[in-house]
Amino acid sequence: MTGARLDRPSADGLPDLRDARGIVTGASSGIGLEIARGLAGAGADLVVPVRDAGRGERAIASIRSTDPQARLDPERVDLARLDSVRALVERLLDDGRPIDLLVLNAGIVLLGDRERHMSADGYELHLHTNFLGHAVLVLGILPLLLAAPEPRVAVQVSLAAASAKLDLDDEFVTGSYTPLRAYGSSKLALGLFGLELGRRHSADGLRVALCHPGIVPDTGIAPALREKSSPFGRALSRSLGNTPAEAAQPAVAALTTDVAPGRFIAPSGPFQLSGPAEPRKLFRTLRDETAAARVWRFAERIAHAG
């Protein structure tokens, strides 16, 4: 596998990805599954890291039921465990093939209670799973990304990042805590990290784009929020939003179209809740380059500690 050049459009409008090797995290269900389905349908050879092997096998079977030739390799990883992420990095480095496409999509949201959940490594669980696990993965496989001729990274943030605040001095270990705040902060940290990745390696040919899926009524954060809403709010939330396949389009477009620096791909409808993917203005919270550099240093410190 020598890597792909993304300049040969296919019948469905995507570039011909038959020479591309990619990774999609969180592809065992929902939006991530549809991202993987779209990229595999364009010919990409995908690594699908999953925590639950059974769910991963079912996801791959779902894609192959309509695309028997889809190239999908499951890998076990728990993004909330540094040793698990580092083991995946080692396996990918041992394989040695360049990574042309990377989608940082996996995430958790635990809105069922106000308990502060911590990872085995001592970090707040949203921050670890949604941001830190991805950051350690990216920094570990960076040589494989830079070995590709036109590497692309899509960083899946969330509408919650638009109003989030980030305090790396506390990391939600001792200060005030709500799961929704922790989720928003984790997605903000991931977005800032992605933008800093792009700034630091644009001269190496690495292109990073941020995206978010909008609202998907029956996946992601929406069901948990709906449980806390009024009856009217619950009914309204079910009538808004994208399907998982529609919600996958911002990430797919972020990998396969040109996105100007300082912008990202998101739904085109009111409040970015739904609609076709299009370039949108970057959230104000994501424009702080000082914060992005600090997030980067934090991630580097953790990544290199092992």
Image: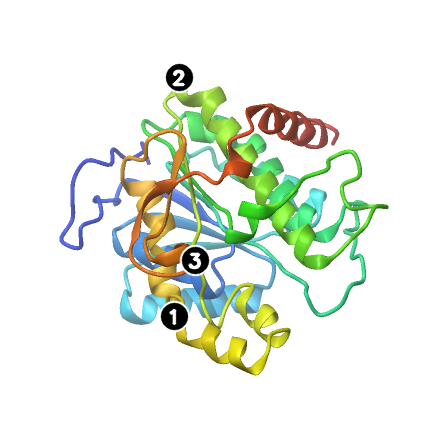
How would you rate the neighbour count of disc 1 (Cα within 10 Å): few for under 14, some for 14-19, many for 20 or more? some
* Amino acid under disc 1: Ser
Horizontal and vertical percent for residue 299? 66, 32
Look at the image and tell me in which quarter the C terminus lies. top right
Image point 49% across, 20% down: which residue? 200
N-term-proximal mark, 3 vs 2: 2
Q: Which type of secondary structure does the marked residue at label 1 adopt?
A: helix
The residue beneath circle 1 is 62
Lateral position of residue 179 relative to residue 220, left or right: right
Query: Marks 3 and 1: which is nearer the front?
Result: 3
Circle 3 residue: 214
Which callout, 3 or 1, points at the residue further toward the start of the chain? 1
- Helix, strand or loop at mark 2: helix
* x then y, percent, for residue 180: 66, 57
Tell me whether the residue at label 3 lies in contact with that at label 1, contact meaning CB atoms closer than 8 angstroms: no
Mark 2 lies on residue = 203
Q: Of tags 3 and 2, which is closer to the observer?
A: 3
Whether the residues at callouts 3 and 2 have beta carbons within 8 Å, the answer is no
User: Of callouts 1 and 2, which one flags the residue occurring earlier in the amino acid sequence?
Assistant: 1
Confirm whether residue 93 shows in the render. no
Position of the N terminus by quadrant: top left
Q: Position of residue 205 (x, y in %)?
A: 36, 23
Name the residue located 33 percent from the left edge and 31 percent from the top edge: 260
Name the outermost residue toward the bottom: 231
- Cα distance between the residues tagged 3 and 1: 24 Å
Q: Residues within 10 Å of mark 3 (few under 14, many from 20)?
A: many
Count of picture labels: 3
